[in-house]
Amino acid sequence: MLYELRKAEKSSPRVGIHKTLFLSFSLNLALIAWAPIAGAQSAHFVRMDGKISGTVLLKAGNRPASQVAVRLKSHAAGIFRSILTDLEGHFEVKSLPPSTYEIVVDEPGYEQAQASTQLDGSSSELVLYLKSSSVPRTPLDSYSVSVRELKIPSKARREYEKGLGSLAKKDIAGSLMHFTKACEAFPDYYEAYYHVGVAETKLGHKDEARRAFQKAIDLSSGRYAWAEFGFGYLLYQEGKSEEAVNIIRRGLEADESSPVGYLVLGMALLRLNRLDEAERSAHEALLRKPNFAQAYLVLADVYACRHEYRAQMQDLDVYLKLEPHGEESEHVRQARVVVLRILASTIPKSDFAPNKKVPFNTPQDATGANPQSAELEPRLNKN
């Protein structure tokens, strides 16, 4: 990596800095893009002691809604559960990791009831109301999803959750074994097939990953967006960026709330040199997840392609502020030094008068010093 940076400085810094940063980013994207589990679990252990419980009531008469399907999901934690309420309208879901959860109740003849809760401690208690629909209808799609989830055997669920735990601990081979067993126990388990694709991607088995992602797409009839994001990223890695854009957009039609979907879309558009679209896609990711550090790297690459190095510097700084010890932080710091040198060679000397500040921001280290600026200042004075 250091050799590539030095090579970029000596030959063509304007092209080299973009390629260096973008390559390091793309090679490590798999560490974050596939993981609907990463935000809720540490690298050392997985907390699974949380509980969400609640009561579903009929709005008219405040009566308990018994034997209705309650769906609980968290894309961030990779958790998808379904359960029926008891005779008193009560439900309880245990063994949950900390995360934000969406709870949905679907019942024919009633409007859909939804709630969201952040599980930080050990439990969360909810009350949901079912209101009679003015136009009675049966929400076939949602209801069929609920029925499917209720049919998932407990053995398949256990293997799936063991796979998530192994993946969080970076035991990729172990996670693949558990996800494969989950698929064997329940052949329609598209979430498990998706994670087989995740594990195969991390192991560098692209053909196997492609088959697993396609299986997840087929089993979910295209409703499980993560599978399309995974397939799109594989196409992107293979240089098939136009195809990647098409399949990622299909995924966003199924889940337009996904910041990861817009991130990978931005990367593919960037490779096609569609800079304005790539920039918009990165901003869409940030609208959905304001502290999404990787989106700032896409923006930094966009500005590098335009030779807008001050803007690039700002986004590199934002990334380092959000991820000071992240997987890419050291690479980004090295790239940042190159950008500083490019700026130093292009900014007029008059801009560095004794009482004039350098017109770009540089973050301080842990001691409050600014090693990059200190390195730059003597070099400027010699000129």
Image: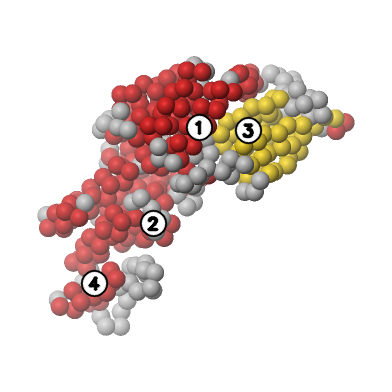
**Residue placed under numbered mark 1 in the picture:** 162
**Residue placed under numbered mark 4 in the picture:** 375
The residue shown at (21%, 51%) is 1
Residue situated furthest bottom in the rendering:
355
The residue shown at (56%, 43%) is 47
Q: Name the one closer to the observer, 44 or 336.
A: 44
Q: Which numbered disc, 3 or 1, marks the residue closer to the eye?
A: 1
Q: Amino acid at mark 1?
A: Lys
Q: Amino acid at mark 4?
A: Glu
Q: CA distance from mark 3 to mark 4?
A: 53 Å
| Sequence-earlier tag: 3 or 1 | 3
Q: Are marks 3 and 2 in contact (CB under 8 Å)?
A: no
Q: Amino acid at mark 3?
A: Leu
- Callout 1: 10 Å neighbours few (<14), some, many (20+)? some
**Residue placed under numbered mark 3 in the picture:** 72
Q: Which numbered disc, 3 or 2, marks the residue closer to the eye?
A: 2
**Residue placed under numbered mark 2 in the picture:** 325
Q: CA distance from mark 1 to mark 2?
A: 28 Å
Q: Amino acid at mark 2?
A: His
Q: Is residue 217 something one can see in this rendering? A: no
- Callout 3: 10 Å neighbours few (<14), some, many (20+)? many
Q: CA distance from mark 4 to mark 1?
A: 49 Å
User: What is the x, y in percent for residue 79?
Assistant: 56, 34
Q: Left or right? Give the position of 159 relative to 369.
A: right
Q: CA distance from mark 3 to mark 2?
A: 33 Å
Question: Could you say whether the residue bearing mark 3 is in a helix, strand or loop?
Answer: strand
| Sequence-earlier tag: 3 or 4 | 3
Q: Name the one closer to the observer, 84 or 228.
A: 84
| Sequence-earlier tag: 4 or 2 | 2
| Sequence-earlier tag: 4 or 1 | 1
Q: Name the one closer to the observer, 295 or 345.
A: 295
